[in-house]
Image (spheres, grey):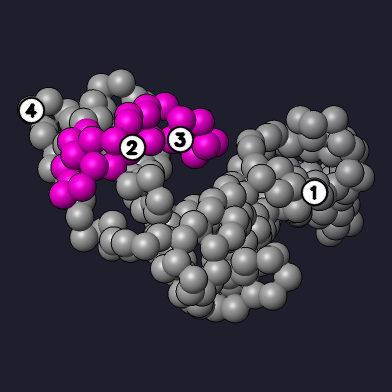
Amino acid sequence: MTNIFIITLLLFFFKTPDPLEIHFQVTHPTCAGKCDGTVKVTVTGGQPGYMFFWSNGSRAQNYYDACAGTGELVVKDIAGNIATGAFAVVDPQPISIDKLVTHPPLAGRNDGFIAVEISGGLLPYYFSLDGEKYSTSNEFYNLPPAPYVIYIKDTNGCLVQSSTFVLDENVNNVDLKSVYHFNYRPEKHALHIYSDIEMSMELADLQGRVLKKEELSKSHDISFDDFYYGIYFLRLSDGVQSSYEKIVKSSN
């Protein structure tokens, strides 16, 4: 009877610990390009007295102020057991200005108009012309001739702004959206733009770099063989007012 008791005690004290495992809880950044993500870690198994070795050199248990990207964590327990885990921190979709429509005021009148269409970020959106007073309306009325910048925030406070553009007086306002048309030519991988009036054309990337520019004409062609997959912005202008369109080149 005594021998059985001793064997039971030995089995109890030498029980093999559970395998060492890493569990990640990732909170992604609030805005694209902002480093406020977190990676919190829970360790199970092994023998307590854990040591943490992050791929960025940190030795803390949790990773704060994380930017978008991937990384690795090595955990070592007091007995020398090692576990390795990988994690990913992902930016939210950035706020993108898809279209900007302007109607300059008539000469001697403050009846200019600006409208903007956006995507990305997190609803609701807030819009401003001065960066201080915001509203949920994406349209601005009764505007005098002047330079303008549109500021856009989402519910997380992520902020983007347009480049500066000018509303000049126009004695013959034309609704630009009604005078130009698109025709995609798949056999040529090209977009043909034709209009009822002469218009200039600029194609820019997301960083605002002008990739293609043509002077006033009723016909423009964009060959997609010249560009990588992604999002581009097309500006059409009659010399007084401008209209903006988002162009997406996909892999399909």
Question: In the image, is 172 to the left or to the right of 117?
Answer: left
Please, what is the three-letter code of the amino acid marked with disc 4? Glu
Q: Quadrant of residue 19?
A: top right
> What is the distance, in whole Å, between disc 1 and disc 2 at their CAs?
42 Å
Name the residue tied to disc 3. Answer: 205
Most distant residue in the top direction: 226
- 195 in the magenta segment: yes
Question: In the image, is 159 to the left or to the right of 200?
Answer: right
Name the element at disc 3.
loop
Q: Which mark is residue 149?
A: none
How busy is the neighbourhood of tag 3: few (under 14 within 10 Å), some, or many (20 plus)? some
Do tag 1 and tag 2 residues touch (Cβ < 8 Å)?
Answer: no
Q: Write down the region rendered in magenta.
A: 193-220
Residue plotted at (71% across, 43% down): 67
- 169 in the magenta segment: no
Looking at the image, is mark 2 or mark 3 nearer the viewer?
A: 2
> What is the distance, in whole Å, between disc 4 and disc 1 at their CAs?
49 Å
Name the residue tied to disc 2. Answer: 201
How busy is the neighbourhood of tag 2: few (under 14 within 10 Å), some, or many (20 plus)? many
Residue 203: percent from left, percent from top: 38, 35
